[in-house]
């Protein structure tokens, strides 16, 4: 996905998150999805992000207060974005899942396949994409399909979430599968 590498703002944001030295991290959800759908819709301006979802996996420090410290640090450095940090080592408790073993494992439990795509910047500046659902998620993302994740079991919540997000209004070519 050269679109991210060509986006100077996203590259500087990825660099700023990389400098926090988080374990097993990526920026996912709308950060990747919105960019792809904006490009596929040929929008001249990017769709605003509600927040930037930074996820990481640190089983040794699961206090929510650490997430808030990371948010504050990045908010001070890049105040034009709203930052949201979530340690995936504690997120299993919210939905009654078994403990996750990595960020990718946690992403497999997100509500939609095409949202479970993330990116991180490596120490050498290379971009690594985290896509635990593999080709199906990437195909859905590029085809502008919304599909429920097989590991996310609450269909009522999923359907309400899709409606409330208004994705099909913002990107009219997007379809539910």
Image: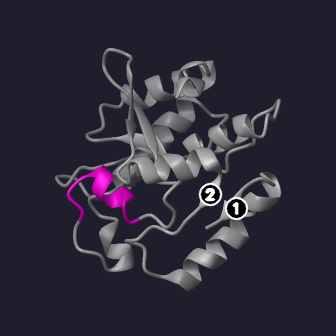
Report whether residue 68 is seen: no
Q: Which residues are magenta?
A: 100-109
Residue 110, image x, y percentages: 44, 64
Q: Residue furthest bottom?
A: 156
Q: Is residue 30 left or right of residue 132?
A: right
Q: Residue furthest top?
A: 124
Q: Nearer the viewer, residue 137 or 49?
A: 137
Q: Earlier in the sequence, mark 1 or mark 2?
A: 2
- The residue positioned 20% from the left and 58% from the top of the image is 101
Report whether residue 20 is seen: yes
Q: Nearer the viewer, residue 10 or 17?
A: 10
Quadrant assignment, res 90 = bottom left
Q: Are marks 1 and 2 in contact (CB under 8 Å)?
A: yes
Residue 175, numbered circle: 1
Residue 103, image x, y percentages: 31, 51
Q: Is residue 66 left or right of residue 15?
A: left
From mark 1 to mark 2, how far is it between C-alphas?
5 Å
Q: Which residue is mark 2?
A: 145
Q: Which quadrant, please, contains the C terminus?
A: bottom right
Residue 102, numbered circle: none
Q: How is the image coloured?
A: one colour
- The residue positioned 55% from the left and 33% from the top of the image is 76
Q: Nearer the viewer, residue 2 or 90?
A: 2
Q: Is residue 14 above or below residue 161?
A: above
- Residue 108 is a magenta residue: yes
Q: Secondary structure at mark 2?
A: strand
Residue 26, image x, y percentages: 40, 40
Residue 152, image x, y percentages: 42, 73
Q: Residues within 10 Å of mark 2 (few under 14, many from 20)?
A: some
Q: Secondary structure at mark 1?
A: strand
């Amino acid at each position: 996905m050269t679109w991210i590498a060509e986006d100077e703002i996203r590259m500087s944001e990825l660099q700023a998150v990389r400098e926090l030295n988080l374990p097993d991290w990526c920026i996912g959800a709308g950060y990747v999805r919105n960019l792809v759908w904006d490009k596929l819709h040929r929008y001249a301006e990017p769709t605003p992000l509600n927040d930037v979802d930074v996820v990481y996996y640190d089983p040794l420090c699961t206090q929510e207060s650490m997430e808030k410290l990371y948010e504050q640090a990045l908010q001070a450095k890049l105040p034009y974005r709203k930052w949201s940090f979530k340690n995936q080592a504690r997120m299993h408790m919210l939905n009654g899942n078994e403990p996750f073993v990595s960020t990718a494992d946690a992403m497999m439990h997100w509500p939609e396949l095409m949202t479970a795509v993330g990116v991180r910047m490596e120490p050498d500046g290379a971009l690594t994409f985290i896509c635990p659902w593999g080709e199906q998620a990437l195909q859905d993302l590029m085809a502008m399909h919304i599909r429920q994740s097989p590991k996310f079991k609450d269909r009522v919540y999923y359907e309400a979430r899709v409606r409330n997000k208004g994705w099909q209004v913002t990107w009219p070519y997007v379809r539910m599968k």
